[in-house]
Amino acid sequence: GLITRLRHPVSQGGGYQWEVNPEELTLGRELGSGQFGLVLEGRWRERKVAVKMIREECMSDEDFKEEARVMMRLSHCKLVQLYGVCTQHSPMWLLFEFMENGCLSDYLRARKGRLSQDTMLGMCVDVSEGMAYLESSNFIHRDLAARNCLVAKNNEVKVSDFGMTRFVLDDQYTSSQCSKFPVKWSAPEVIRYCKFSSKSDVWSFGVLMWEVYNEGRLPYENRSNAEVVESLNAGLRLLKPRLASDSVHLLMEWCWKEKPEDRPSFALLLHELASLANL
Ligand SMILES: CNC(=O)Nc1cc(-c2cccc(-n3cnc4cc(C(C)(C)C)ccc4c3=O)c2C)cn(C)c1=O
């Protein structure tokens, strides 16, 4: 309404991104550092937040500011919410919903041997809900993996850093021949032609399911990216995790169909996973 709009004036420069007043922000301990720089815990308006302090040489921040308005509008209980940006700082700060239990890959590894079937299936349902929402918003993640999902206080899993690869300046990371490119999570059409789509996100989701049911193990353990590409081209796929049922494994294999159009949508995956979970 009008009152809230007055309280959050549209920031200068006519952008609609949500400008946060840094004076309202209290910074806390370091959470780690990501692709764009340091991430601190913080408090903003009675809630815990994660503050990403963007390093100029890591992000094309002008492009991001353009995109911020789109990112602000993406809101779903299984997406890590962007609360706002502080562009008065240079480099700018990004404010996110705080996720108590950190990233999913660490969470899985810390609980090896203690994850129930319901817990693992629930994690896959959570991620497919968030991804079905992004799919319905025609928004592509481009780097879906367990390391880019976060775990909330109530152990709910949420999708993080969706679409953010578009602002990465490190071309070791962005071009598919280079070492840092996430080949092990990438669909064949992404590796060959950088053709991203929600169906290439579905391929990555299949690998994420494999990560969950393998308690956070690295896919294709000690094989190089080049060896992985060769085996994919030979039609080989990741093997069924010991803890995965045949029906869960079937869904993974469906996500790894060579042709994007032969893979399920996230809407369909969500339906299948929810019925496996008797939801
Ligand atoms: C204990 N609780 C917590 O630690 N909670 C949290 C940790 C982080 C966190 C901390 C350090 C680094 C990163 N990180 C990791 N990977 C990233 C990957 C990318 C791409 C572009 C490569 C996808 C971009 C940014 C990042 C990034 O900032 C995150 C998400 C973020 N949030 C919201 C938390 O609640």
Image (cartoon, rainbow, N blue to C red):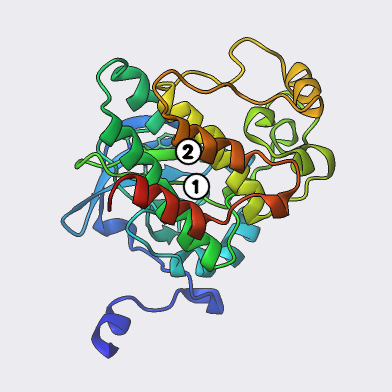
Q: Could you tell me if the residues under marks 2 and 1 are in contact, i.e. CB atoms within 8 Å?
A: yes
Residue 131 falls left or right of residue 195: left
Q: Residue at left 37%, top 78%?
A: 9
Residue 73 in percent (x, y) is at 45, 70
Q: Which residue is mark 2?
A: 148
Q: Residue at left 47%, top 69%?
A: 17
Q: Secondary structure at mark 2?
A: helix
Label 1 crowding class (10 Å Cα cut-off): few <14, some 14-19, many 20+?
some
Residue most toward the front?
246
Q: Which residue is mark 1?
A: 161
Q: Earlier in the sequence, mark 2 or mark 1?
A: 2
Mark 1: amino acid:
Asp
Residue labelled 2 has its Cβ within 8 Å of some atom of ligand 1? yes
Residue 85 in percent (x, y) is at 43, 59
Q: Residue at left 58%, top 61%?
A: 139
Q: Is residue 258 above or below residue 2?
A: above
Residue labelled 1 has its Cβ within 8 Å of some atom of ligand 1? yes
Which residue is at the front of the view, 103 or 249?
A: 249
Residue 59 image label = none
Mark 2: amino acid:
Asn
Residue 102 in percent (x, y) is at 33, 33
Residue most toward the left?
46
Residue 156 in percent (x, y) is at 27, 44
Q: CA distance from mark 2 to mark 1?
A: 7 Å
The answer to whether any part of residue 36 appears in the image is no
Residue most toward the right?
193
Q: Quadrant of ligand 1?
A: top left
Residue most toward the bottom?
2
Which residue is at the front of the view, 257 or 11?
A: 257
The answer to whether any part of residue 219 appears in the image is yes
